[in-house]
Image (cartoon, helix red, strand yellow):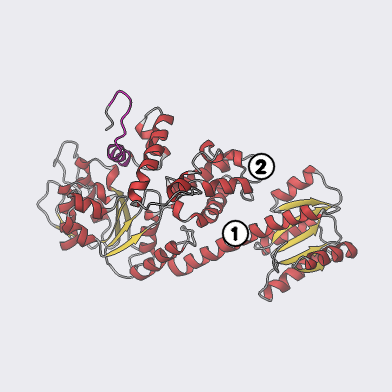
């Protein structure tokens, strides 16, 4: 049934406890016993002190001194890394539901069937391993990088953490690249928190979500009467970030005129508000992000080469979620814990089928989309865990599951011919956007919200991918 996992069997009948422990030892487990809840707590304490905590505890419900339910509560509070499986000779649906609600990962009825025990232990160990990995990564990120809101153990993400740690103490300009929803804002905040500017303001602005006519005013401010609607002086985002950090997201959407103004601010640390001749000096650390490859935009002539070289001092690339599938369980559990807490509900995790469906899905909206999916599932869930039926139809049906296989060749025995990744992703991206537009009756704002991108980005993608509404030009 597995490796040398540490199992504690708790039963007031010594014969039952010993026989079950012997069976587990024969199957390769490190099993020990306790005759009631109090003795089990002592065993858990000893294991913790010895640096080899119990991974799974199998406990009877009815026992003298401290029963199984009380032991479950004690374990959940003091030994959260130990997964608990409840056992009883008087199994009822009510008792099972109550045990699961209180944090047990499974509920078995005596006499224990070997096959049921095997499956229960596999689930419990998987649950314990996932929880342990998540806690370890969270501690690592909190202690070393101040990035507790970012979860992931993929090697490319670990490289991101190392770059954050290296660049945070300086005032060096940082450029981030990555698709929408990959967590660029979280990384920017982490750099700020780890810097000497942490006590000063962190100001964020999405250049793609603000009309070009207003973006200059938002960044640099304006004086009263400088344009129609300027009824009072306004302090811009750069001035608001003085002494702190300003994060300019979707910098790829800035116009040529705005790019020139940004170049001057980066070089001289000074600017003039709209309608003013007064020059304002500012000390703000600048972090920028793009959801399109700036190198290509420079080659196309739509992004200034001198600005690109000025901002491309330290570059951090955030991988899309579909390229770090191993992080999906950790992220899903992280978001579930967050949303279940907000809803004041006890949801223990995901069924195997639900998690497999999440791992198959390609997440065009990346981590942001996963967070929204888990929030939706937590709201709709009526049991103690997220089931396949709680997930959105396109995920539950697996209709998107074959996309990654199609891009990478899958099981196709034919000859493999490499093509540029950007070209390979065009058609899948086009299909995803078309499907979302059709599902939202071609409502651009609703489609952008569903895809977790802003409307300006959606317009640009539609134009780039030659997507037109039937009977009307897209734009």
Mark 1 surroundings within 10 Å by alpha-carbon count, few (fewer than 14), some (14 through 19), many (20 or more): some
State whether residue 282 is above or below residue 473.
Answer: below
- For disc 1, the marked residue is 130
Question: Mark number for residue 117?
Answer: none
* Residue 282 shows up from this direction: no
Q: Would you say 215 lies left or right of 317 here?
A: left
Determine the residue located farthest toward the bottom in the rendered image: 50
Residue visible at 76% across and 47% down in the picture: 96
- Residue 310 in sight from this viewpoint: yes
Give me the C-alpha separation between circle 2 and circle 1.
21 Å
Tell whether position 460 is magenta. Answer: yes
* Quadrant hosting residue 81: bottom right
Disc 2 packing (10 Å; few <14; some 14–19; many ≥20): some
Residue 292 in the image, given as x and y percentages of width and height: 30, 50
Q: Quadrant of the C terminus?
A: top left
Which residue has dot 2 on it? 383
Residue range highlighted in magenta: 456-472
User: Circle 2 sits in a helix, a strand or a loop, which is it?
Assistant: loop
Q: What is the secondary structure assignment of the residue under circle 1? A: helix
* Label 2 with label 1: CB-CB less than 8 Å: no
Q: Residue at x 44, y 54 (%)?
A: 323
Which residue shows up at 64% across the image and 58% down it? 126
The residue lying at 75 percent from left, 56 percent from top is 118
Q: Nearer the viewer, mark 2 or mark 1?
A: 1
């Amino acid at each position: 049934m597995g490796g040398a996992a540490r199992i504690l069997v708790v039963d007031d009948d010594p014969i039952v406890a010993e026989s079950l422990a012997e069976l587990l030892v024969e199957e390769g487990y490190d099993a020990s016993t306790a005759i009631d809840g109090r003795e089990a707590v002592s065993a858990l304490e000893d294991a913790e002190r010895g640096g080899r905590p119990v991974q799974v505890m199998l406990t009877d419900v009815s026992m003298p001194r401290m029963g199984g339910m009380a032991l479950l509560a004690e374990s959940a509070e003091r030994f959260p890394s130990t997964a608990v499986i409840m056992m009883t000779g008087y199994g009822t649906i009510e008792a099972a539901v109550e045990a699961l609600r209180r944090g047990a990962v499974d509920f078995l009825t005596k006499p224990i069937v070997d096959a049921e025990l095997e499956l229960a232990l596999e689930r419990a160990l998987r649950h314990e391993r996932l929880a342990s990995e998540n806690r370890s990564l969270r501690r690592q990120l909190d202690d070393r990088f101040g990035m507790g809101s970012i979860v992931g153990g993929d090697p490319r993400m670990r490289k991101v953490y190392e770059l954050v740690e290296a660049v945070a103490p300086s005032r060096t300009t940082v450029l981030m690249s990555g698709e929408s929803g990959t967590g660029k804002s979280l990384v920017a905040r982490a750099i700020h928190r780890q810097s000497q500017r942490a006590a000063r303001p962190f100001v964020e602005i999405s250049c793609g979500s603000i009309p070009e006519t207003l973006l200059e005013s938002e960044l640099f401010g304006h004086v009263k009467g400088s344009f129609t609607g300027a009824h009072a002086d306004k302090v811009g985002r750069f001035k608001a970030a003085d002494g702190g950090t300003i994060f300019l997201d979707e910098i790829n959407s800035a116009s040529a005129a705005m790019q020139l103004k940004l170049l001057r601010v980066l070089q001289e640390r000074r600017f003039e508000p709209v309608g003013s001749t007064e020059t304002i000096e500012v000390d703000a650390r600048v972090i920028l992000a793009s959801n399109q490859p700036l190198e290509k935009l420079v080659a196309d002539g739509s992004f200034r080469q001198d600005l690109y070289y000025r901002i491309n001092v330290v570059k951090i690339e955030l991988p899309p979620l579909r390229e770090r599938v191993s992080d999906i369980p950790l992220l899903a559990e992280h978001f579930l814990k967050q949303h279940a807490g907000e809803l004041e509900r006890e949801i223990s995790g995901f069924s195997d089928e639900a998690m497999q469906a999440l791992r198959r899905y390609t997440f065009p909206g990346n981590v942001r989309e996963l967070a929204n999916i888990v929030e939706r599932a937590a709201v709709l869930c009526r049991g103690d865990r997220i089931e396949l039926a709680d997930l959105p139809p396109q995920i539950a049906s697996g209709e998107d599951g074959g996309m990654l296989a199609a891009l990478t060749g899958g099981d196709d025995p034919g000859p493999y011919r490499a093509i540029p990744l950007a070209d390979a992703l065009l058609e899948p991206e086009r299909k995803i956007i078309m499907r979302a537009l059709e599902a939202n009756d071609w409502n651009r704002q609703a489609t952008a919200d569903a895809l977790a991108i802003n409307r300006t980005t959606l317009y640009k993608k539609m134009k780039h991918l030659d997507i037109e509404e039937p009977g009307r030009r897209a734009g």
